[in-house]
Amino acid sequence: MASPSDPPAPIVLDHRTRRPQRGVIVGGDPPRVLRLSGSGSDLLDDVLAGRARGRAADVLAARLVRDGIVQPVRPTRDVEDAMTVVVPVRDDADGLDRCLAALRGLPVIVVDDGSADAAAIGATADKHGVPVVWHALSRGPGAARNTGVAQVTTPLVAFVDADARISADALRTLARWFTDPHIAAVAPRIRAASAAPTVLHRFLSARSPLDLGPDAALVRPRGRVGYVPTTVLLCRRSALQSGFDEELRYGEDVDLVWRITDAGHQVRYDPGVVAHHREPATWRAALMRRHRYGTSA
């Protein structure tokens, strides 16, 4: 984790930010006009160039990050804290097989949420040498993740759905954000997995509700990126509080992220790391998913 002797985290102007004249900054989330004194402008130049250190530079950088005027650059140093991956699944042995193959090299806990064919899930987990925790009856994805977290002892926990695919190396790259002690969770961009080039696949590739776009952001309610899904989400275990609300069958991920930000922690969206998700195969299934997501509002 970060220490006082570490160099300041590099930042860059958000691509929407403009400096029409010296001392004036236009941008942010939501958009605003910020005026700086001459010395403030000099300090900003030094911070952007990586030359400034000290309390004044830290305060300015923190405010600009919070306001969305600048974006931090993902750290290059790997974190020492270990992570465990929790994979909830229900009747998707094929998806679980692909998911676990991509995660090879990381400790994984599978939670079977009342699958009708539990034997297929168990066989798939055994194939990859991964333990399984069982729910006799389906209790929902939030409960499955909570059951998995209860088995985790590492400081970091990654949630990866069985129908998602992200490599162990990509998760390690995401974990570099945790060199910043203010960050409690980080999510990658979720893109549609490759499929037949149908109209539906092209539509979901461009308009999947899980894909939050190409721009990095600080996640917060009513912000440009107001939430991130737990399709793939990496968290500090200590920031999970009481975990997922098990009464919510949908939207439990948004609820958790908002409670983390309400507690004063930062959640980041990093589209420079990409995970892939198996999308619905029919228009009916796609529209039903949209309806289910809408009920969580």
Image (cartoon, rainbow, N blue to C red):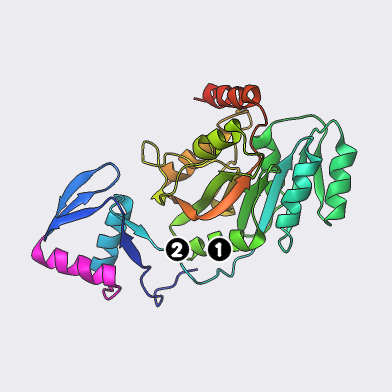
Secondary structure state at the residue bearing disc 1: helix
Q: Quadrant of residue 210?
A: top right
Residue in the foreground of this view, choosing between 184 and 18:
18
* Placement of 94 over or under 171, stated as above or below: above
The residue sitting at 55% across, 68% down in the picture is 79
Secondary structure state at the residue bearing disc 2: loop
**What is the x, y in percent for residue 9?**
38, 68
Q: N-terminal of the two: label 2 or label 1? A: 2
> Visible in this render: residue 256?
no
Residue type of the residue flagged with mark 1: Thr
* Placement of 79 over or under 117, stated as above or below: below
The residue sitting at 38% across, 75% down in the picture is 7
Which residue in the protein does label 2 denote? Answer: 74
**What is the x, y in percent for residue 237?**
59, 53
**What is the x, y in percent for residue 105?**
73, 64
Q: Are marks 2 and 1 in contact (CB under 8 Å)?
A: yes
Residue in the foreground of this view, choosing between 214 and 195:
195
Give the CA separation, mark 2 to mark 1.
9 Å
Question: Which numbered marker is on residue 173?
Answer: 1
Describe residue 163's horizontal placement relative to residue 170 as left or right: right
Dot 1 crowding, Cα within 10 Å, few <14, some 14–19, many 20+:
some
Residue type of the residue flagged with mark 2: Arg
Q: Main secondary structure of the magenta part?
A: helix
Q: Is residue 42 magenta?
A: yes
Q: Is residue 117 magenta?
A: no
The residue sitting at 54% across, 59% down in the picture is 174
Q: Which residues are magenta?
A: 37-55
**What is the x, y in percent for residue 69?**
28, 53
